[in-house]
Amino acid sequence: MAKVESFTLDHTKVKAPYVRLITEETGKKGDVISNYDLRLVQPNTNAIPTAGLHTIEHLLAGLLRDRLDGVIDCSPFGCRTGFHLITWGKHSTTEVAKALKGSLEAIANDIEWKDVQGTDKYSCGNYRDHSLFSAKEWSKEILSQGISDQPFERHVI
């Protein structure tokens, strides 16, 4: 079985919340795709409940696209501690951290239920499992700790 970089990361050494570049891959035609670790809570210490994480996921899908060029996808980790962000091209971790911070600030302070996309049975595979309240509370908690652009030392942007 192929080795997966994320499973070789020493989760006891990282200091969340942070943004980490996992990999940049260049396709046959020269296109670059980047994969980032958007770690919102400390691994093996905390996890965001599924309803809140699900709502954060739906909101980040749009909010990150508003703040960062080339977003392909933002998908939650199964461990519920953060997200993979996949983009076209290269972005610094500082640039990604600023986009994440702005998105979480919007969730914490501005977003209302009517702003959450994909919350009915036609547009979401588990539409009953959402919580804007939880998404807002977790966003506030994450922001209160500051988002670092480095995974192993706190360099808050």
Image (spheres, rainbow, N blue to C red):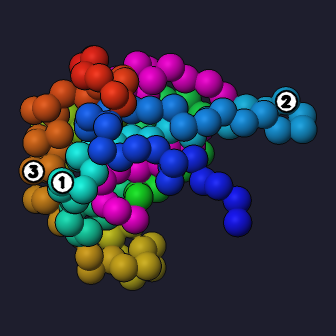
Residue that appears at 66% across and 33% down: 24
**Which is nearer the N-term, disc 3 or disc 1?**
1
Residue that appears at 45% across and 23% down: 93
- Residue 34 is left or right of residue 47, and the answer is right
Vertical order, 40 against 118 (above or below): above
Examine the rendering and report whether any part of residue 147 can be seen: yes
Q: Quadrant of residue 49?
A: bottom left
> Is residue 67 a member of the stretch shown in magenta?
no
Q: Which of these two is toward me, 15 or 75?
A: 15
Q: Give SS at disc 1.
A: loop
Callout in the foreground (1, 2) = 1
Residue 25: give x, y in percent of width and height. Answer: 72, 36
Residue that appears at 40% across and 19% down: 94
**Which is nearer the N-term, disc 1 or disc 2?**
2
- What amino acid is found at the position of numbered circle 3 in the picture? Glu
Looking at the rendering, the stretch of residues picked out in magenta corresponds to 78-98
Q: Which mark is residue 137?
A: 3
Q: Which of these two is toward me, 63 or 75?
A: 75
Q: From mark 3 to mark 1, how far is it between C-alphas?
A: 17 Å
- Residue 145 is left or right of residue 78, and the answer is left
Which quadrant would the C terminus be assigned to in this image?
top left
Q: Quadrant of residue 44?
A: bottom left
How packed mark 1 is, by other alpha carbons closer than 10 Å (few <14, some 14-19, many 20 or more), is few
How packed mark 2 is, by other alpha carbons closer than 10 Å (few <14, some 14-19, many 20 or more), is few
Q: Which residue is mark 1?
A: 45
- What amino acid is found at the position of numbered circle 1 in the picture? Thr
Q: Give SS at disc 3.
A: helix
